[in-house]
Image: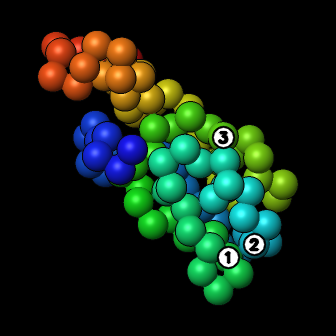
Amino acid sequence: MKNFRYLPNVVTLSLDQIKCIGCSMCETVCPHQVFEMQDRKAQIVDLDACMECGACASNCPVEAISVTPGVGCASYIIKAWIYGKDANIECC
């Protein structure tokens, strides 16, 4: 999954380190390994791999994560899986 990318630096994902309690739910539910636990806190380690599905934000018990699902590349990635990444695909 690491090779699926759309546009760099457009993802709406953000993480509030102060609110993070280190539960690791974001790391567990993220299908693209965007998060990693470091020093008992979540870290965003691969922002451009985020497909903005919203699983991390939906499962964060302290609302330390925000993302606007579907704004960036989720639609593109799903269509690329179905039609092939070289197909002429419009995003969103």
Dot 3 or dot 1: first in sequence order is 1
The answer to whether 54 is drawn above or below residue 79 in the figure is: below
Please report the residue visible at 25 percent of the width from the left and 20 percent of the height from the top.
84
The answer to whether 87 is drawn above or below residue 50 in the figure is: above
The N terminus: image quadrant: top left
* Residue 61 appears left or right of 6: right
Q: Residues within 10 Å of mark 3 (few under 14, many from 20)?
A: some
Please report the residue visible at 31 percent of the width from the left and 22 percent of the height from the top.
80
CB contact under 8 Å: marks 2 and 3: no
Q: Amino acid at mark 3?
A: Ala
Residue tagged 1: 41
Dot 2 or dot 3: first in sequence order is 2
Alpha carbon of mark 1 to alpha carbon of mark 2: how far?
Answer: 4 Å
Q: Residues within 10 Å of mark 2 (few under 14, many from 20)?
A: some
In percent of width and height, residue 91 lies at: 31, 20
Dot 1 or dot 2: first in sequence order is 2
The answer to whether 1 is drawn above or below residue 28 in the figure is: above
Alpha carbon of mark 3 to alpha carbon of mark 1: how far?
Answer: 18 Å
Alpha carbon of mark 2 to alpha carbon of mark 3: how far?
Answer: 16 Å
The C terminus: image quadrant: top left
Q: Amino acid at mark 1?
A: Lys
Q: Based on the displayed image, in which of its 4 quarters is residue 7 positioned?
A: top left
Q: Amino acid at mark 2?
A: Gly
* Residue 46 appears left or right of 80: right
* Residue 48 appears in view: yes
- Mark drawn on residue 22: 2
Camera-nearest residue between 79 and 52: 79
Residue tagged 3: 55
In percent of width and height, residue 20 lies at: 73, 69
